[in-house]
Image: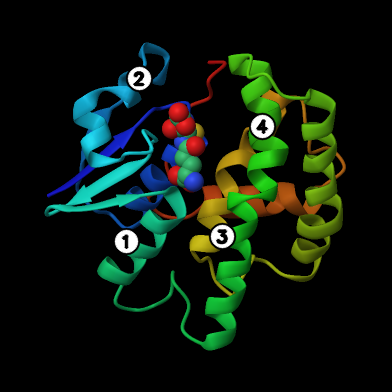
Amino acid sequence: MITLYDFSPSGNSYRARLFLNLLGLEYENSPIDLRQGQHKDAEFLKLNPLGQVPTLVDDGEVIRDSCAILIYLSDKYDSSGNWSGKTAEEKAHIQEWLSTAAREMMYGPARARAIKLFGRPFDLQEAQSLAHQLFTDVMEPHLHQNQWLAASRPTIADIASYAYVTVSDEGEVYLDNYPNIQRWLKDVEALPGFVPMVRASS
Ligand SMILES: N[C@@H](CCC(=O)N[C@@H](CS)C(=O)NCC(=O)O)C(=O)O
């Protein structure tokens, strides 16, 4: 039995939730309310000493970190290898995007959103500028040439990247100048099993 500990407005949690649904896997959702500080409860810290969501438990195996969860689920439950990459080149390109999702995506669009929605104490202009740099220099040109991020089909690179791009407007980072990113968002949304991100502002 898979249990996902998550917080619905969290984009990192959404990465795991979206992928579980795309794979059609049954799982139990265990909400951890960050606003109530539940992620620092002793019971939860026993599972994930970092006190972060998402955390996934599968048959006693505890996986923390959204990208690690994507790797785990694809390796464990997608025997085709479509999601996790089939060649050295695909695997390397997927890893590039997972690293980008963990760094540039977090310091850019995710941070801008966290400042606007949750009052996190960072520099909004800097985060918005990093987001536009990522979109302008990296994602838009790549998606102008390619339908998907890391292969000729969707992979976990797309799932990791989609979460914070789709709600970038919640950090007042708008996608009007990025037609290829907008097209790619729609392509992800057309995947069978897709579930939308819970917009924190809704
Ligand atoms: N690298 C981790 C980051 C997880 C993370 O920062 N989660 C946030 C919610 S989006 C959290 O739990 N924050 C609470 C805290 O760090 O105290 C991942 O990708 O899952």
**Which residue is rendered at x = 63% and y = 14% of the image?**
119
Q: CA distance from mark 1 to mark 4?
A: 26 Å
Let me know if residue 62 appears in the view. Answer: yes
90 w.r.t. 22: above or below: below
Q: Which residue is mark 3?
A: 98
Disc 1 crowd rating (10 Å Cα; few below 14, some 14-19, many 20+) is many
Colour pattern of the rendering:
rainbow
If you read the primary sequence from the N terminus, does the residue marked by circle 2 or circle 1 appear first? 2
If you read the primary sequence from the N terminus, does the residue marked by circle 1 or circle 4 appear first? 1
**Which residue is rendered at x = 72% and y = 70% of the image?**
146
Q: For the residue marked with disc 4, what is the amino acid?
A: Arg
Q: Are marks 3 and 1 in contact (CB under 8 Å)?
A: no
Question: Which numbered dot is residue 111?
Answer: 4
Q: CA distance from mark 3 to mark 1?
A: 14 Å
Q: For the residue marked with disc 2, what is the amino acid?
A: Asp
If you read the primary sequence from the N terminus, does the residue marked by circle 3 or circle 1 appear first? 1
Under circle 1, the secondary element is helix
Q: Are marks 2 and 1 in contact (CB under 8 Å)?
A: no
Let me know if residue 197 appears in the view. Answer: no
Disc 4 crowd rating (10 Å Cα; few below 14, some 14-19, many 20+) is many
**Which residue is rendered at x = 76% and y = 57% of the image?**
139
If you read the primary sequence from the N terminus, does the residue marked by circle 3 or circle 2 appear first? 2
Question: Which numbered dot is residue 33?
Answer: 2
192 w.r.t. 13: above or below: below
In-front residue for pair 143/2: 2
Under circle 4, the secondary element is helix
Q: Which residue is mark 1?
A: 73
| Left or right for 116, reference 83 | right
Q: For the residue marked with disc 3, what is the amino acid?
A: Leu
Residue 182 rendering spot, x and y as whole percentages:
72, 46
